[in-house]
Structure formats: C-alpha cells, structure tokens
Amino acid sequence: MAFDWLNKFHKEMEQADDYAEKTLAAYKLGMRSKGSIAGVRVELVPGACEICSQVDETAVFHPDNAPRLPLENCQNDKQCRCVYRPVMTYEEE
Ligand SMILES: [Zn+2]
C-alpha cells in the first residue's frame, strides 16, 4: 500500500505537542512533491465536544488555512483528539 508512511506518520504525530504545525507542514510538502494530496480535512472523534463538533468534517482545507488542532476553545481541555486527515486528489469529486 502506497500510503503506509502516512499511517505510520499519523500514529507518531497524534500525541505530539506541535501536532498541528508538523502535520500541516508535512501535508503541504506532500501537496508539492507528489501531487497526490489535495488538502486536509478534520476528522472528529466520537464524543467530541460541542465546539469541536462544529468543524465541518467534509470541508477540505489548504494546510495554511486549516483550523489548528486541538481547537483553542475545546471544551474537553483539548482532549477531544480530533485529527487531520489528508485528502487525496483521487478522492475529490
Ligand atoms: Zn473538543
């Protein structure tokens, strides 16, 4: 599977303090080098708080414009663990 590196990357990154910065930077690189990443979306976790739940899961952001995770005003003390997921060009309609 071509995207093994992504899965590994996600596991390592999701706990990091600078998760948002590093993840978005990596996606940006992916957009430039291989052209298969179209953007980034936010995936909510089950039980995410009211604030986090307001993020549109279907919205595709450019890494520069994506909301920073964890969301500043998360009601669960930033514990919602909402994550970024890359959107591949072949997923776009
Ligand atoms: Zn939250």
Image (cartoon, helix red, strand yellow):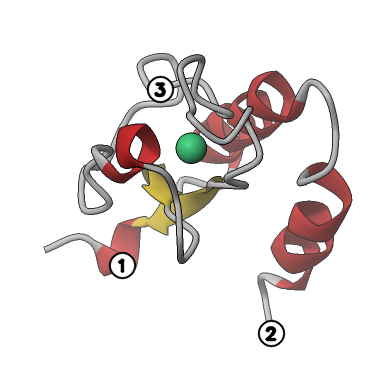
| Residue ID at (39%, 24%) | 66
Tag 3 residue: 67
Kindly identify which numbered label has been placed on residue 1.
Answer: 2
Q: Name above or below for residue 47 compared with residue 40.
A: below
Which element carries disc 3, helix, strand or loop? loop
Is 36 situated above or below 74? below
Q: CA distance from mark 3 to mark 1?
A: 23 Å
Q: Which residue is mark 1?
A: 90
Element type at marker 1?
Answer: helix
Relative horizontal placement of residue 33, taking residue 37 as reference (left or right)? right
Look at the numbered discs 3 and 1 and tell me whether their residues touch, using CB distance below 8 Å: no
Q: Which mark is residue 34?
A: none
Q: Residue at x 21, y 43 (%)?
A: 56
Q: Residue at x 31, y 45 (%)?
A: 53
Q: Position of residue 49 (x, y in %)?
A: 41, 44
N-terminal-most mark, 3 or 1: 3
Q: Amino acid at mark 1?
A: Tyr
Figure check: 72 above or below 26: above
Q: Secondary structure at mark 2?
A: loop
Ligand 1 neighbours mark 1 (CB distance < 8 Å): no
Dot 1, crowdedness within 10 Å: few (<14), some or many (≥20)? few
Lateral position of residue 40 relative to residue 60, left or right: right
- Residue at the spot x=66%, y=40% of the render? 79
Q: Residue 74: x, y in percent?
A: 49, 27
